[in-house]
């Protein structure tokens, strides 16, 4: 199981969004981070993958909070500033 597969599974469990949608999101993230994105291809042995999944499941509330904070910051960045002319 790859790191990306593990991330998709955890995001699916935390958000309830379809895995297909989350795989597209991961593809987009990887496109924006070509060097860092290589770590997503790392293969984990089945027992190691299950251990990582269980650790992430224990952090479910923190992951959800982190996602909400990131979404809020993104919305703020997209808001027009006072310098915008209409």
Image: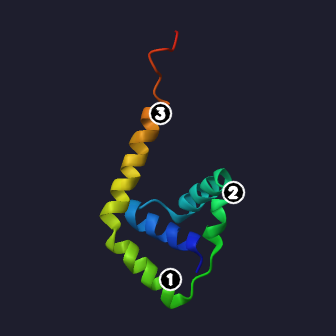
The residue to which callout 2 is attached is 34
* Side of 27 where 22 appears, left or right: left
Count of marks, rendered view: 3
Q: Regarding mark 2 in the picture, which secondary structure is present there?
A: loop
Which badge, 1 or 2, is on the more N-terminal residue?
Answer: 2
Q: Which residue sits at x=56%, y=88%?
A: 45
| Residue annotated with mark 1 | 49
Disc 3: which residue: 77
Kindly report which numbered mark, 1 or 2, lies closer to the viewer in this rendering: 2
Sequence order check: which comes first, mark 3 or mark 2? 2
Q: Can you tell which quarter of the image residue 15 is in?
A: bottom left
Residue 61: x and y, percent? 30, 63
How far apart are the two marked residues, 3 and 2, measured between alpha carbons?
Answer: 23 Å
Instruction: Please tell me which residue lies in front, 56 or 5.
Output: 56
| Residue 15 left/right relative to 3 | left
Q: Secondary structure at mark 3?
A: helix
């Amino acid at each position: 199981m790859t790191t990306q597969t593990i991330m998709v599974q955890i995001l699916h469990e935390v958000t309830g969004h379809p895995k297909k949608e989350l795989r597209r999101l991961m593809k987009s993230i990887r496109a924006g981070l070509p060097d860092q994105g290589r770590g997503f291809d790392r293969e984990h042995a089945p027992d190691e993958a299950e251990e990582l999944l269980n650790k992430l499941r224990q952090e479910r509330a923190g992951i959800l909070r982190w996602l909400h904070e990131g979404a809020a910051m993104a919305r703020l960045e997209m808001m027009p500033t006072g310098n915008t002319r209409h």
